[in-house]
Image (spheres, rainbow, N blue to C red):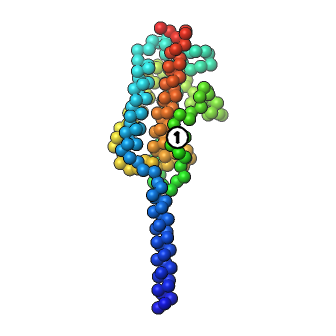
Amino acid sequence: MKIILTLALVLGLTVLSKAQTKTDQSSNAPVWTEGDRKYLLDNLSRSKQEVIDETRNLTKEQWNFKESPDRWNINQIVEHIALWEILFTHEISRALAMEPNPTFAAAPDSVFLGQDPKELNALDYTKPFSFAIPLGNNEGKNNVIWLTTMRNESIDYLKKETKNIKLQYDYCGGANVYQYYLAIFSHTDRHLRQIRKVKTHPKYPK
């Protein structure tokens, strides 16, 4: 009888210990709040609208103006943003297909904000591939439609999502869905600065 009671006590403590460990791990899991939802929606909508505003009523000459032969024109910049929108949403869809993981050792959110390489040609950080290099085959306004269509899909999704997207990870990229959306609007902001720089060039068509 004593042996049985001892075993029961040991097993009970073991179960309690495991449960406590699980609780401790879960208590450190990131939480998806309504404030987070608003932050993403505000910035995804804002950056989308800024692309629309910066490219509204541009002439063909303005769309195609380059500061120098090795720089992108505004048409190419918008196409590049759209290309990355596809890449980011692909990773998001992979993450959403995974089981939620409250114990994944994720990078801090700050890594995904404003960390894009500045003044670095996309080919330099996608070598040996050229998937991020815009071809310039579309008209500029069509690239804006392409980008805003994809962005609207994300905005509609985020308005309705109820599960904790901070627990949905793409393990290859090491980011959760929330962090990918941080990267999306941060990347757009960087290239908005690039568009504005093109427009301040002394030879930019008026």
Q: Position of residue 91 (x, y in %)?
A: 50, 42
Q: Tell me the residue at 52%/28% (across/down).
A: 190
Where is residue 148? Give x, y as percent.
Answer: 41, 29
Q: Examine the rendered structure and indicate whether residue 163 appears above or below residue 68.
A: below
Residue reaching furthest left?
Answer: 160
Would you place residue 58 above or below residue 90 in this image? Answer: above
Q: Residue visible at 46% across and 20% down?
A: 140
Label tally: 1
Q: Position of residue 48 (x, y in %)?
A: 41, 28
Residue 151 position by quadrant: top left
Inspect this view and state whether residue 49 appears: yes
**Residue 97 point in image, percent of width and height:** 45, 49
35 or 96, nearer to the observer: 35
Q: Is residue 131 left or right of residue 12?
A: right
Tell me if mark 1 has few (under 14), some (14-19) or many (20+) residues whose alpha carbon lies within 10 angstroms of its own.
few
Image quadrant assignment for residue 111: top right
Disc 1: which residue:
110
Q: Amino acid at mark 1?
A: Ser
| Residue located at (62% from left, 19% from top) | 70
Dot 1: element: helix
- Please state which of residues 31 and 55 is positioned toward the viewer in this rendering: 31
